Image (spheres, rainbow, N blue to C red):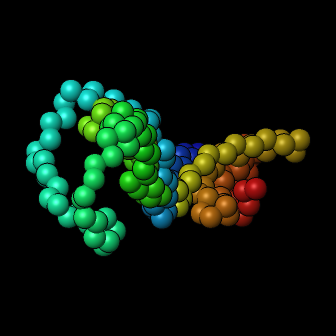
Amino acid sequence: MATNKKIENTLAILALICLFLFGFIIGKQTTSSKPVIEYVKGETITRLIPYTEFIPVKVYEPGETIYIDSIEYLINEIDTIALIAEYVKTKHYEQVLFDVDTLGKMQVNLSIAYNSLRSLDYEFTPIVKQITTIKHQTYTPFLSSSANSFGTVGVGGGIYRNNIGYEAKYITNFSKQGVEVGLNYKF
């Protein structure tokens, strides 16, 4: 009789160890959810390029006929005051080269005075593509223990799968032993 009890207790302990190992192995299994793609605005890069760096590559001298917007103009007289006023005038230009949700925004600012480029600066705000893959556990193992006012104690464990738990527990009141099977729901 005592030997049967020892064998039962040994088998119960071995069963618990096996359940624990089974739960541990099952708990390591995960499944990947869909990757989450976000576009994060980066730090704005600004650079001013001084005008001394700009050297004309080609200079075109107008002939006696100038075409502006497909209209032909003959040069008969030269308006010196208008030419000097145009020559001294400083013109500022701002142009957005691109503003794309996936690349960012690039803006160029330039100034022209004395018939040459005086300053050129740009602002670039990049957009960085950030991919996050979230892994969810398919199986979550758990251990449990219990005691109640009837003098019974229990030890067990189980697994949760999609918020539903399956539990097996060894219970005893030290004169009688048994196995309890349970179904749980995780909120």
Q: Residue at x 45, y 55 (%)?
A: 99
| Residue sticking out furthest to the right | 149
* Position of residue 1 measured from the top left corner of the image (x, y, whole percent): 60, 50
- The reply to whether residue 110 is visible in this rendering is no
Give whichever of 118, 140 is nearer the camera: 118
Relative to the observer, which residue lies in front, 46 or 143?
A: 46
In this orientation, which residue lies closer to the viewer: 120 or 46?
120
Q: Can residue 23 be seen in this view?
A: yes
Examine the rendered structure and indicate whether residue 96 appears above or below residue 56: below
**Which image quarter holds the C terminus?**
bottom right
Task: Give the mark count.
Answer: 0
Residue 16 pos. (x, y %): 54, 49
- Measured as percent of width and height from the top left, residue 34 is found at 48, 64
Name above or below for residue 89 compared with residue 155. above
Q: Which residue is drawn at 61% across and 59% down?
A: 160
Q: Where is residue 175 in the image (x, y as percent from the top left)?
A: 74, 46
Q: Residue 66 vs residue 59: left or right? A: right
Q: Residue furthest front?
A: 77
Residue at x-position 44% and y-position 35%: 43
Horizontally, residue 105 falls left or right of residue 73, namely right
Q: In which quarter of the image is residue 162?
A: bottom right
Outermost residue, left side: 58
Q: Which residue is drawn at 52% across and 61% down?
A: 138
Residue furthest bottom as drawn = 70
